[in-house]
Amino acid sequence: MAAPLELFCWKGDYGLPSVDIDCLTVLAYAKFAGAPLKVHKITNPWRSPTGTLPALKTREEGSISQPSKIIIHLRKQKYNADYDLSAKEGADTLAFVSLLEEKLLPALVYTLWIDSKNYVDVTRGWYAENIPFPLNFLLPNRMHSQQLEKLRLVRGDAVLEPGEQLEKELYRDAFECMTLLSQRLGSQQFFFGDSPSSLDAYVFGHLAPLLKIKLPNGKLQQHLNSLNNLQQYCSNILELYFPSDAREAPGHKIHVEPHSGDFDNEPHKRRNQILSVLFAVGAMLGYAIFTGIVKIKREQPQLNNSSHHDEDEEDED
């Protein structure tokens, strides 16, 4: 029997199966397509086979990290949530996914990672609390910089700076996108009838964080909450496909080990704890030496003890 596909993704919280947009998209598509994945919900992206999350470990193509490429691979393995779509529905899927990435995603990046109040009070706090020590001092700020760079690339502006005007433009586009999605969904359970497709996975992945994560500056959330059918749509997907996660209270922190499955045995856990402490001590010592707080005194060898000095050099080699 072939080994199951392994998916590495950010763990869940707030009643979500994952806190990350891309991970939510892949998890939802896998559920919709019936793909039998072995899921590792972790809080250290460096433990994934690609160093990023989500990541799919396969036998045929190695490890894949981008949601679109992961979905393509699952389709190749005959796990296709779009199998029954017509040509027109397939074209509509491409158009709406492009709309999400162009209009809604930049606003999501801004509200979660760039808005100072939301970032400091919620986003950075969550990752700093859940990423294992000592990486929790490093990765949140690094991820913040990566998200800002992503926003600059999407907007085509290398010197883009956060501000009231940028926020206004991003939120206007996002409101328009969510309104169009609401109109397209109408009273249907899913976008193309009674069965979910890849479009539903993308829409759920982008909207579910807004539905469940409580943000101090919640302009996007307020607009989503005014669109009752989209709000109910996300809630239904959570209850149907992720019932154990949906039962978690919003904002409740789920304290789990930073990795699962094969990584949960005691020797690995103890080794990782020791390595983390050594890493932290080494980093602090290196910083102290670099800044001059600690100085290393070199002693000159004594000429009358040359034989002992030679022996020490052999030991070091």
Image (cartoon, rainbow, N blue to C red):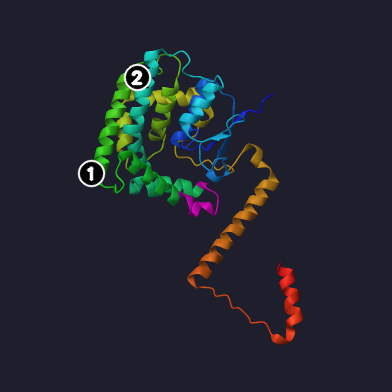
Specify the amino acid type for callout 2. Answer: Leu
Q: Is residue 135 magenta?
A: yes
Q: Position of residue 18 (x, y in %)?
A: 49, 35
Q: Which numbered dot is residue 165?
A: 1
* Depth check, front residue: 293 or 215: 293
Mark 2 or mark 1, earlier in chain: 1
Magenta segment: 130-140
Q: Which residue is mark 2?
A: 185
Numbered circles on residues, count: 2
* Residue that lies at the very extreme toward the bottom in this rendered image: 304
Q: Residues within 10 Å of mark 1 (few under 14, many from 20)?
A: few
Judging depth in this view, the residue of 38 and 266 nearest the camera is: 38
Q: Quadrant of the C terminus?
A: bottom right
Callout 1 secondary element: helix
Q: Nearer the viewer, residue 81 or 228?
A: 81
Q: Is residue 233 magenta?
A: no
Q: What x and y, as percent, mark residue 207?
A: 38, 31
**SS for callout 2:** helix
Residues 223 and 143: in front is 143
Residue 221 pos. (x, y %):
33, 35
